[in-house]
Amino acid sequence: MSTKDRLTTPVLDVRDVSKEFVHQSKKIPILRDVSFSIHEYEFISIVGPTGCGKSTLLRIIMGLIPPTKGEVIYKGERVQSVNSRMSMVFQSFALFPWLTVLENVELGLEAQGILKEQRNKRALKIMQEVGLEDFENAYPRELSRGMKQRVGFARALVIDPEILLMDEPFSALDPLTAEGLREEVMRLWSDKFTSPEIVIMVTHNVEEAIYLSDRVIVLSQRPGTVILEFNVGMPRPRDRRSPSIYELTDKITSLIA
Ligand SMILES: Nc1ncnc2c1ncn2[C@@H]1O[C@H](COP(=O)(O)OP(=O)(O)OP(=O)(O)O)[C@@H](O)[C@H]1O
Ligand SMILES: [Mg+2]
């Protein structure tokens, strides 16, 4: 692939994606003609009101469910089954309570058939990167919410995904813990040796989206459709309390309220 192609060919192309669910034999439209493209090294946020189909869109992007209409193209090919180059971080952590932290983190590697010794090495390294050293034998119930979400991140990152999907990863955390974990995500994102090429984060929080992302995609009320897409264009590291972040947050919030 030439340099020009690398610059112009998107890694992920969401094309006219619509989704309907059938409820009591009635078709309910959830997403309508959603289109956007994502290039390598982009951190994208998708914001929108509750129930507008954000989680559904992430599931379609990952290949967990098919769209009713339209398609998702990943590196030139249509996504038709679960894309193993992507992993997901969930709001609710989604950890297995009967497994230790280390076992939870190793799960994705086990699914890839990686041998025990290698799994262990890789899991311990990623746990160290996300601040989980010394917790390998703990069970999820013994951890605070913030630490549980660190396990969520470690489990997603351990497979070295090309695209990291995050579904409201900070919204079940108290404000201070959320702030700390956002900083960590930014630190990991700046470290190009360990980070995924692309992050797609779903959030309700416009300020959080602006603080973290290169580009923000705003969806309408259900059925969700793209009503606004904007480049944040602020250099990193960003100051969460800077007036420019507040101003942009106000402007976007008033546009979508
Ligand atoms: N499998 C399903 N079958 C039927 N309806 C569904 C299914 N999954 C989601 N829905 C409905 O689709 C709508 C959109 O759901 P989705 O979870 O994608 O929205 P969301 O934007 O992520 O919402 P929230 O901000 O509350 O997380 C909701 O009304 C939900 O009830
Ligand atoms: Mg959701």
Image: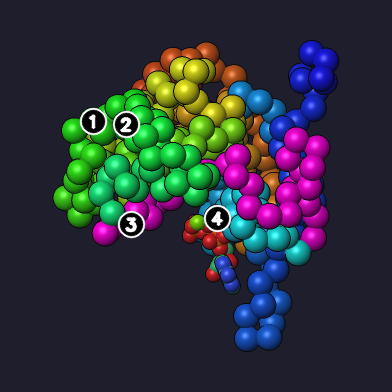
Q: Earlier in the sequence, mark 1 or mark 4?
A: 4
Residue 124, labelled with which disc? Answer: 2
Q: CA distance from mark 1 to mark 4?
A: 31 Å
Mark 3–mark 2 Cα distance, whole angstroms, equals: 18 Å
Upstream in sequence: badge 3 or badge 1: 3
Per the rendering, the mark at residue 133 is: 1
Q: Nearer the viewer, mark 2 or mark 1?
A: 2
In the rendered structure, the answer to whether residue 143 lies left or right of residue 22 reads: left
Q: CA distance from mark 2 to mark 1?
A: 7 Å
Give the spatial CA distance, label 3 vs label 1. 19 Å
Q: Separation of disc 2 and disc 4 at Cα?
A: 30 Å
Q: Which mark is residue 96?
A: 3
- Numbered disc 4: secondary structure: helix
- Please tell me the numbered disc located at residue 44: none
Q: CA distance from mark 3 to mark 4?
A: 21 Å
Graded by Cα atoms within 10 Å as few (under 14), some (14 to 19) or many (20 or more), the crowding at tag 1 reads few
Mark with earlier residue (3, 4): 4
Q: Position of residue 104 (x, y in %)?
A: 34, 48
16 or 127: nearer the eye? 127
Q: Label 4, on which residue?
A: 55
Magenta stretch contains residue 79: yes
Q: Which residues are magenta?
A: 69-98
